[in-house]
Image (cartoon, grey):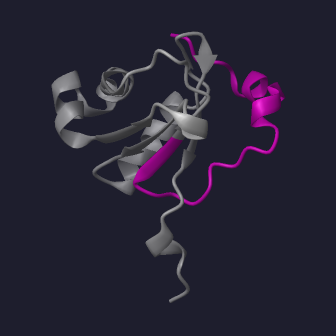
Amino acid sequence: MGKLPPEEILSLPMFKNYTAGNPASVLYIKNLAKDVVPDDFFFVFGSLFGSIDAAKSGLIVKLMQEGRMRGQAFVTFPSVELAHRALNLVNGYVFKGKPMIIQFGRNPAAAKPS
């Protein structure tokens, strides 16, 4: 598979200040190739669900396709635990020629002081 080793990932300039952030059920994915489509995420994360069809029913994908958010996506998982496994599995995975950078999405609701 096309996953870079952790030391190589961390040596890339785009990963310089990388932190995964606080675990959340939403993953924020950036550095995507221009030709990535929403269906690609079902393929990439399919192994976590057992099949691409199961991924389709389990994931909510929001791919930004224009403006300065282009090349970024938000993928919502059924649970924080599954999102965490997905991040560990796919962060640094080279997809369509570019390593994907994955962080936990900042959940505005979770960030509020209780």
Q: How far across and how far down the image is residue 9, in percent? A: 73, 26
Give above or below for 67 relative to 84.
above
Looking at the image, residue 69 sits to the left or right of residue 61; the answer is right
Residue found at the very far bottom of the displayed protein? 114
Q: How far across and how far down the image is residue 8, in percent? A: 77, 22
Give above or below for 3 relative to 50.
above
Determine if residue 48 is in view: yes
Residue 110 within the segment the image draws in magenta: no
Q: How far across and how far down the image is residue 105, in percent? A: 51, 53
The residue drawn where x is 57% and y is 32% is 91
The residue drawn where x is 55% and y is 29% is 71
Nearer the observer, 89 or 38: 38
Determine if residue 51 is in view: no
Residue 21 within the segment the image draws in magenta: yes
Give above or below for 100 relative to 2.
below
Nearer the observer, 85 or 68: 68
Q: Which residues are magenta?
A: 1-28
Looking at the image, residue 12 sits to the left or right of residue 99; the answer is right
Looking at the image, residue 58 sits to the left or right of residue 79; the answer is left
Quarter location, residue 25: bottom left
